[in-house]
Each structure stands twice: as structure tokens, then as C-alpha cells.
Amino acid sequence: MKVLCSAVHVAAGTVGASAISGPLSAHVERCDTCAGEIRDLEEVSIQLRLLEPATFRAPDSLYRDVTGSLGPFAVPDLDPRSSLRVPVAAAFVATAAAGTVVIIRMRRQRAA
């Protein structure tokens, strides 16, 4: 897998197709594999938006069942706002890392 393909895969998988810009966007236009992956991701996103909220609502007992099965490792989150902090931070870090790898590789290729 090429470096740019890997960066597209990481960016699209973490923050969605909207994260594809700059050099990644130019790569997606030239790479059939990456273009197909982005098209598939956009199609899934469209289909999910078309679902009625009742269709994908989790059962009320899901939280209790999952945390109960984890045993002593389950610690309740006292701050409901923090539920998005970790995934958003992880997506940001992954995108930044992928972008850094792409930039470093591009500069090394230009220097060679």
C-alpha cells in the first residue's frame, strides 16, 4: 500500500471523507482504489442519514448490560460531555500523524 493510500485510509476511516483535502484530494482523484473507498464511505454515510432514528436506537438496557459484563473494569463516566473528547482527540491525532507522514515523505522525495 502506498503512503498516500495509507493516509487516505486513516483519514477517511477516522474523520470521514470530508477530511480528504490538499495532497490527499489530488491522490484520490488519481487512485482508483482510494476513490472507490471514498465513494463507498460516502454511500454508507448517505444511507445512515436516511435511516429513521428509531431504526438505530440502542436498547435502553445496553449500557447496563455492557458495563455489567465488564466487571470491575467498568467505571461510570461522571462527565457526559467527555464522551466525545477521546474519539475526537484520537481522530485529530491520527489525521495529524497521517498528514505529517505524507508531508515528510513528499519532502524526502523532492530532496532526492
Image: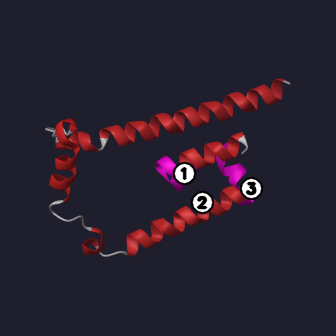
Magenta-drawn stretch, dominant element (helix, strand or loop): helix
Residue at image coords 15%, 53%:
64
Question: Label 3's element?
Answer: loop
Mark 3 residue crowding within 10 angstroms, few (<14) / some (14–19) / many (20+) = few
Residue 19 included in the magenta stretch of the image: yes
Residue 70 included in the magenta stretch of the image: no
Residue at image coords 37%, 42%:
87
- The amino acid type, in three-letter code, at marker 2 is Ile
- The amino acid type, in three-letter code, at marker 1 is Ala
Q: Is residue 21 left or right of residue 14?
A: right
Q: Is residue 59 above or below residue 109?
A: below
Q: Say which quarter of the image contains residue 36.
A: bottom right
> In the rendering, at what x and y percent does residue 26 appear?
71, 50
C-alpha gap between disc 3 and disc 1: 14 Å
C-alpha gap between disc 3 and disc 2: 11 Å
- Magenta-tinted stretch: 13-32
**Mark 1–mark 2 contact, CB under 8 Å?**
yes
- The amino acid type, in three-letter code, at marker 3 is Cys
- What residue does disc 1 label? 12
